C-alpha cells in the first residue's frame, strides 16, 4: 500500500504552492530585544545586511529561503519589510519553526525543517482502492511533510467515503519517524458502515402517493436486498438531484407552481441510517387553454403555423410539449430561410379556471452565430460522437432551444455521468462559443446470468457488451447461452451514425441448436443479417435488411410422416430480404402517463433454397398509468403469417410456435396443430392478445413486490397441406389468472397462476409459471 513517485536524477523541485500554508500562526522576531510585530519608533529604522546567515537547513536549499525573504545582500529594508519577509517564510509551509534575528550587519535566519515524506501508506481501506485515494492527496512522497496538508488529506479521504454513503468513516494521519529527517505518512482509515436511507417520506403531496413519488426520485429506500443496491445509501448530492426530478415530474403534469420546500434528513436512533422527508407544495394544476400563433415579422403569415400546434385544450399543461411545438415552428422558419427568427411562447395564466392560454409569437431574434463548439472531459469518447448530437454547427445561427435539446440528447446517450452545456460570448459580440463539459462513465459490461422457466428448465448465459465501443458510439455484443437441449450464440454490432447521418448500420449473426420435444429430433439454425435503419419522424423509424439464413432437421426418432418428409429435405440455406418499422411514443423524451409501441416487418426468405416464403409479423402495445399513476394497465396485440410462394413449402423451423409468455397457462409448444405422434407442428399463422394490470399490494415500496391480473387469448393454426387426421384449423385459446411481480436487483421475477378457460383436448396445460432473468 505504498505510493512511490520516482524523480528524475538531478531534478530540483520548487516548493509547491499547494503547501504554502502558514506553519506558525504567531511568532516573535527579535533584534536587539525588540519585537518586529510591535515595533518601537527606534525599530522603524531601515536595515542593510551585508550577509544572511541561515541555520538549520538540511534538505531545503538556501536559495529557496532567500526567494521567500524577497531581498538580497546589501539591499536596504525597513522593519515592516523585514516583518513581511518573516511572514512569507513562515507561511511557506516548509518549516515547523522560523526565527529571524538581525545581528548587526548580519541577518540570522533559524529554521526547523518539516521532515520529508519517504512514502505514503493507507491502511484499513477496503471499499476504496489505494490508487483511487492516493490520487486525491496533496501530500506526495519526497515532498515536505506538512501537518495541515496531511489533515486536509484526511478530510479528503473521509469525504470520498461520505460520497459513497459511509458518513461514519474516520481517517487519522500518523507519521513514523525515519533517519535523516524523513517520515512515513500513514492514513489510518476506519470505513464504518454504509449510511442507508431507512425511510423516504413525503409531506404535502395530495395528487400523487408516496409510492408513486418514490419511483420518481433517484434515492431509494433500503429494502430486503439492500446489500445489492447502491442508490439506497444517503448521498446529499443525490437528494439535491431528487428535487429537480420531482419538479420536472409535477411540471409535466400541469403543476407549474410545485416546489420542494425543504428536505430534512434525520439520523435513526440506532445511528446506522437516515430518515429522509421531502416537504412538497403542489400548487394548482393547470391545463392548456386557448392556443394561437401570431407573427411580428413582416412577410410571415401566422396562419401557416397554427396547424403545427398539436396541443389540445383541456389536457394537462406540459412545458416540454410547448417547447417541442416551438422547435418545429423554428425548424420550418429555418427551412423558409428565416435564420434569425424565433418563436416566443407567451403564456397567460387564468387562475380561476386553471388554464394557461399560450400564444406562439414569431419574432425577430438577435443575429448571433455559433463561433465554435468546444468539448472537454471526453477522455475515451471521440469528439464527433458528441458533435453528432448537435444539429447546429459552427457558423449557424445560435438557438438556445436547440442547444438545450442537444444537451438532453447527449445525456440520453448514457455515456456520461455528468453533462454541462453552457454558452459564452465569442471573439466578437455577435458570436457565441458553446462549451460542452462531460464526465465519462463505464459503458461496457460483462455478465454471467441465468434463466429459469417452468417447462424450459434452467439456463445459463454469458455476455459482453459495450454501448460505446472504443469510444466511437458504436454498439458491440457477444452472447452465449445454454439450457436444457438448447444452445444459442449471437453477435451484434451497430454504428448509429453512418456517414455522419442518423443512419444506423446493424450487423447481427446467430447460431442456435435445439433438441425439440423430449429429444424426438434436433435442429440447427443460423442467420447473418445486415440492416440499415433511419428515422421517418421523431417517433417512427424504418428498417431494411438482407442476409442469409440456414436450418436443418436431424435425428428424428418418431414415426410422423410429416416430420420424416421435412427431415428428408436436408439442410436448407437461402437468402432473405425484408423491411420493417418501429414506433415508440417515448422517443420524444416526454414523461407521459400513456405511451404507445408498435413494430412490424415483412420478409421474403428461402431465396435459393428449395422453398421460398413471405412472412409478416406485427405487434401493438398501449400502456397507461391510472389511479394517480399507481396502477399500470397494458394491452398488447400481436400476430404473424407465413406463406410459401414457390418450392416445397414451409418447415417446422420456419413456422410459428406459441411460447408461455405470449399466452400464459399453456406449456411451450403446448397449442396448435399436432400429428398422430403428438409432435407440435407449429402453424403458418398466429395471433395473441393480452390485457394485464400491475398494482401495489400494500407492501413496503422497497420490497419491489406488486400484484398482477391478466387475461390472454391466442392461437396457432394453418399448414401448407396436412393429412386428414391433423387439425390445423383456428381454435381460440384463452386464460385468466394472477401474478406476483418482484423487481429484484438481479432481475425481474414473475410467479403466475393461469387457468385456461378455452382450450383443446390436445393442448398441454401449464397452470403455474415462474420466470427469472438475471445478470450478476
Image (cartoon, rainbow, N blue to C red):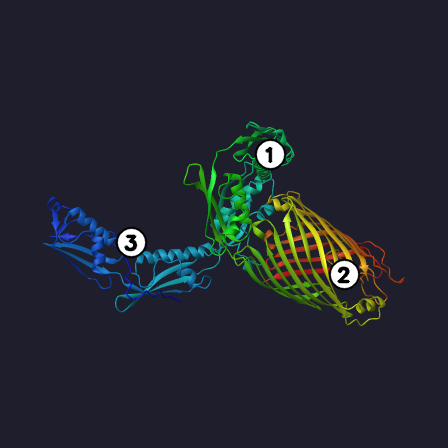
Image quarter where the N terminus lies is bottom left
For marks 2 and 3, the one nearer the N-term is 3
Whether residues under marks 3 and 1 lie with C-beta atoms below 8 angstroms apart, the answer is no
Which residue is tagged 2? 654
* Residue 6, numbered circle: none
Question: Distance of mark 2 from mark 3, alpha carbons?
Answer: 77 Å
> In this rendering, which labeled residue sits more in front, label 2 or label 1?
2
**With respect to residue 36, does 360 lie above or below?**
above
Residue that appears at 18% across and 47% down: 81
- 668 to the left or right of 439: right
Question: Could you say where residue 490 lies in the image, as x and y percent from the top left?
Answer: 64, 63
Q: Identify the image quadrant of residue 346.
A: top right
Question: Could you say where residue 628 lies in the image, as x and y percent from the top left?
Answer: 64, 42
For marks 2 and 1, the one nearer the N-term is 1
- Describe the element under mark 1 as helix, strand or loop: loop
> In this rendering, which labeled residue sits more in front, label 3 or label 1?
3
Which residue is tagged 1? 286
Neighbour tally class for label 1: few under 14, some 14-19, many 20 plus, Cα within 10 Å: many
* Foreground residue among 139 and 744: 139
Which residue is tagged 3? 20
Question: Distance of mark 3 from mark 1, alpha carbons?
Answer: 58 Å
> In this rendering, which labeled residue sits more in front, label 2 or label 3?
2
Question: Could you say where residue 640 lies in the image, as x and y percent from the top left?
Answer: 76, 53
Neighbour tally class for label 2: few under 14, some 14-19, many 20 plus, Cα within 10 Å: some
Amino acid at each position: 500500500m505504498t505510493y512511490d513517485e520516482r524523480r528524475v536524477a538531478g531534478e530540483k523541485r520548487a516548493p509547491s504552492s499547494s503547501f504554502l500554508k502558514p506553519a506558525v500562526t504567531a511568532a516573535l522576531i527579535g533584534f536587539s530585544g525588540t519585537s518586529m510585530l510591535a515595533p518601537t519608533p527606534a525599530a522603524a529604522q531601515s536595515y542593510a545586511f551585508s550577509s544572511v546567515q541561515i541555520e538549520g537547513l538540511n534538505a531545503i536549499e538556501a536559495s529557496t529561503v532567500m526567494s521567500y525573504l524577497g531581498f538580497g545582500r546589501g539591499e536596504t529594508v525597513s522593519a515592516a519589510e523585514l516583518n513581511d519577509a518573516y511572514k512569507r517564510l513562515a507561511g511557506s509551509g516548509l518549516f515547523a519553526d522560523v526565527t529571524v534575528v538581525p545581528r548587526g550587519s548580519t541577518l540570522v535566519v533559524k529554521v526547523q525543517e518539516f521532515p520529508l515524506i519517504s512514502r505514503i501508506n493507507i491502511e484499513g481501506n477496503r471499499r476504496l482502492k489505494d490508487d483511487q485515494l492516493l490520487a486525491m492527496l496533496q501530500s506526495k512522497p519526497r515532498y515536505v511533510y506538512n501537518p495541515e496538508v496531511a489533515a486536509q488529506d484526511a478530510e479528503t479521504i473521509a469525504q470520498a467515503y461520505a460520497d459513497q454513503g459511509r458518513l461514519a468513516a474516520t481517517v487519522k494521519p500518523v507519521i513514523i519517524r525515519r533517519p535523516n529527517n524523513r517520515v512515513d505518512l500513514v492514513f489510518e482509515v476506519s470505513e464504518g458502515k454504509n449510511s442507508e436511507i431507512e425511510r423516504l417520506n413525503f409531506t404535502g403531496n395530495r395528487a400523487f402517493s408516496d409510492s408513486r413519488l418514490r419511483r420518481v426520485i433517484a434515492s431509494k429506500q433500503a429494502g430486503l436486498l439492500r446489500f445489492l443496491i447502491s442508490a439506497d445509501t444517503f448521498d446529499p448530492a443525490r437528494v439535491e438531484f431528487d428535487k429537480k426530478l420531482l419538479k420536472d415530474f409535477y411540471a409535466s403534469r400541469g403543476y407549474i407552481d410545485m416546489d420542494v420546500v425543504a428536505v430534512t434528513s434525520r439520523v435513526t436512533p440506532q445511528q446506522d441510517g437516515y430518515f429522509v422527508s421531502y416537504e412538497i407544495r403542489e400548487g394548482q394544476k393547470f391545463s392548456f387553454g386557448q392556443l394561437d400563433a401570431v407573427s411580428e415579422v413582416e412577410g410571415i403569415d401566422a396562419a401557416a403555423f397554427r396547424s403545427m400546434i398539436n396541443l389540445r385544450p383541456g389536457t394537462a399543461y406540459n412545458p416540454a410539449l410547448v417547447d417541442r411545438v416551438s422547435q418545429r415552428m423554428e425548424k420550418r422558419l429555418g427551412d423558409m430561410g428565416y435564420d434569425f427568427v424565433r418563436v416566443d411562447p407567451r403564456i397567460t395564466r387564468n387562475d380561476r379556471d386553471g388554464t394557461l392560454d399560450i400564444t406562439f409569437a414569431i419574432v425577430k431574434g438577435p443575429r448571433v452565430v455559433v463561433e465554435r463548439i468546444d468539448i472537454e472531459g471526453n477522455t475515451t469518447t471521440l469528439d464527433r460522437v458528441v458533435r453528432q448530437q448537435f444539429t447546429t454547427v459552427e457558423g449557424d445561427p445560435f438557438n438556445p432551444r436547440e442547444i438545450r435539446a442537444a444537451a438532453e440528447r447527449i445525456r440520453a446517450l448514457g455515456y456520461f455521468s455528468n453533462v454541462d452545456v453552457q454558452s459564452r460570448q465569442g471573439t466578437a459580440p455577435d458570436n457565441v462559443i458553446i462549451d460542452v463539459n462531460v464526465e465519462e462513465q463505464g459503458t461496457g459490461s460483462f455478465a454471467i446470468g441465468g434463466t429459469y422457466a417452468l417447462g424450459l428448465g434452467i439456463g445459463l448465459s454469458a455476455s459482453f457488451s459495450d454501448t460505446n465501443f472504443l469510444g466511437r458510439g458504436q454498439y458491440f455484443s457477444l452472447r452465449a447461452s445454454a439450457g436444457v437441449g438448447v444452445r444459442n450464440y449471437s453477435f451484434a454490432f451497430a454504428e448509429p451514425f453512418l456517414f455522419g447521418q442518423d443512419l444506423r448500420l446493424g450487423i447481427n449473426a446467430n447460431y442456435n441448436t435445439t433438441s425439440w420435444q423430449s429429444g424426438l429430433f434436433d435442429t440447427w439454425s443460423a442467420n447473418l443479417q445486415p440492416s440499415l435503419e433511419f428515422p421517418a419522424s421523431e417517433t417512427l423509424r424504418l428498417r431494411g435488411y438482407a442476409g442469409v439464413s440456414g436450418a436443418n432437421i436431424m435425428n428424428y426418432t418418431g414415426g410422423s410422416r410429416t416430420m420424416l418428409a421435412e427431415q428428408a429435405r436436408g439442410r436448407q440455406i437461402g437468402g432473405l430480404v425484408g423491411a420493417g418499422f418501429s414506433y415508440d411514443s417515448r422517443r420524444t423524451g416526454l414523461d407521459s402517463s400513456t405511451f404507445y409501441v408498435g413494430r412490424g416487418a415483412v420478409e421474403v426468405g428461402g431465396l435459393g433454397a428449395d422453398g421460398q416464403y413471405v412472412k409478416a409479423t406485427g405487434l401493438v402495445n398501449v400502456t397507461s398509468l391510472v389511479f394517480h399513476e399507481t396502477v399500470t394497465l397494458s394491452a398488447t396485440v400481436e400476430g404473424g403469417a407465413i406463406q410459401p410462394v414457390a418450392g416445397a413449402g414451409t418447415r417446422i423451423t420456419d413456422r410459428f410456435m406459441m411460447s408461455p409468455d405470449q399466452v400464459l397457462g399453456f406449456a411451450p409448444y403446448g397449442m396448435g396443430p399436432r400429428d398422430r405422434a403428438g409432435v407440435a407442428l407449429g402453424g403458418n399463422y398466429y395471433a395473441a392478445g393480452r390485457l394485464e394490470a400491475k398494482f401495489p399490494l400494500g407492501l413496503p415500496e422497497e420490497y419491489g413486490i406488486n400484484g398482477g391480473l391478466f387475461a390472454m387469448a391466442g392461437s396457432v393454426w394453418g399448414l401448407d397441406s396436412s393429412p386428414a387426421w391433423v387439425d390445423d384449423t383456428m381454435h381460440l385459446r384463452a386464460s385468466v389468472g394472477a401474478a406476483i411481480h418482484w423487481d429484484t436487483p438481479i432481475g425481474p421475477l414473475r410467479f403466475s397462476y393461469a387457468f385456461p378457460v378455452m382450450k383443446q383436448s390436445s393442448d398441454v396445460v401449464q397452470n403455474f409459471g415462474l420466470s427469472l432473468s438475471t445478470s450478476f
